[in-house]
Image: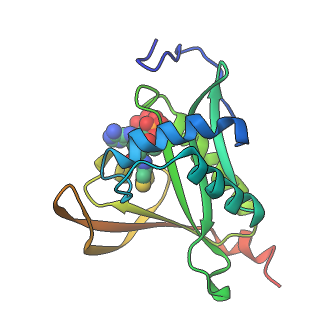
Amino acid sequence: MSAHGVPPSATVTIRPATEADLEAITRIYNDAGVGTTASYDLEPVSVDERREWLERHTSSNHPVLVAVADGEVLGFAGYGSFRDKAGYGQTVEHSVYVADGARALGVGRMLMLALIDRARGDGIHVMVGVLDADNDASVAFHRKLGFVEVGRMPQVGRKFDRWLDALLMQLTFPADGNELRTQ
Ligand SMILES: CC(C)(COP(=O)(O)OP(=O)(O)OC[C@H]1O[C@@H](n2cnc3c(N)ncnc32)[C@H](O)[C@@H]1OP(=O)(O)O)[C@@H](O)C(=O)NCCC(=O)NCCS
């Protein structure tokens, strides 16, 4: 059993996030992202903030998925607009967070594969991850999923009294899949 209480044999289900998942999503995000440099948020977010975040995604038809085992949320992933100009419409920026203790069990991969499937179905051409350049686990994780490093922005973040470099990693879907939905 992992530190998070996930038995190795537990069946993990990926499904769209609901209001009932918000407390777990908030806790995971605050632990995994705000207490580290994985996210450049400086203060813990509230459940209400995450509610607005979920509503923004839902109302713009962007997915937020959760991984659940034995009724417990182990992680979440979602994507939203990369930039708001219409010409960026087939590019999205995603995020993925797995609870400490539920990592290295394949949960992040399951979330991302489901998100990638959804992106393909939505006619997305490029998925972008904006990572902290020193987040070795996330860099390795994204590489494993086929994301490639396309840019590094030195010192665009500041947290814990130091400058942070952002690393841009992207997954570009083959033109074939994209052309199915290109007008
Ligand atoms: C990055 C993160 C989402 C990965 O999720 P995970 O469930 O632990 O990853 P998985 O078990 O699905 O791993 C999939 C692959 O990623 C790679 N990987 C994952 N964690 C890794 C690590 N710590 N070091 C090296 N490679 C790693 C491995 O290649 C792994 O494949 P393998 O099991 O065949 O070796 C998770 O570590 C996390 O939530 N971290 C904190 C928050 C964060 O950094 N989020 C990303 C913000 S950009």
Residue 74, how many percent across, how many down?
55, 31
Residue 97, how many percent across, how many down?
48, 44
| View quadrant of ligand 1 | top left
Residue 144, how many percent across, how many down?
44, 49
The reply to whether residue 141 is visible in this rendering is: no
Quarter that holds the C terminus: bottom right
User: Measured along the vertical axis of the image, is residue 27 above or below residue 61?
Assistant: above
Q: On the image, which quarter does residue 63 sit in? A: bottom right
Count of number-bearing discs: 0
Residue at 71% in and 57% down: 55
User: Measured along the vertical axis of the image, is residue 136 above or below residue 110?
Assistant: below
Colouring mode (rainbow / by chain / secondary structure / one colour)? rainbow
Q: On the image, which quarter does residue 109 sit in? A: top right
77 or 125, which lies in front?
77
Residue at 36% in and 60% down: 40
Q: On the image, which quarter does residue 75 sit in? A: top right
User: Measured along the vertical axis of the image, is residue 161 above or below residue 111?
Assistant: below
Does residue 129 appear left or right of residue 85 in this picture? Answer: left
Residue at 50% in and 51% down: 145
The reply to whether residue 146 is visible in this rendering is: yes
Residue 150, how many percent across, how many down?
39, 73
Does residue 80 appear left or right of residue 164 in this picture? Answer: right
Residue at 34% in and 56% down: 42
- Residue sitting farthest toward the left: 161
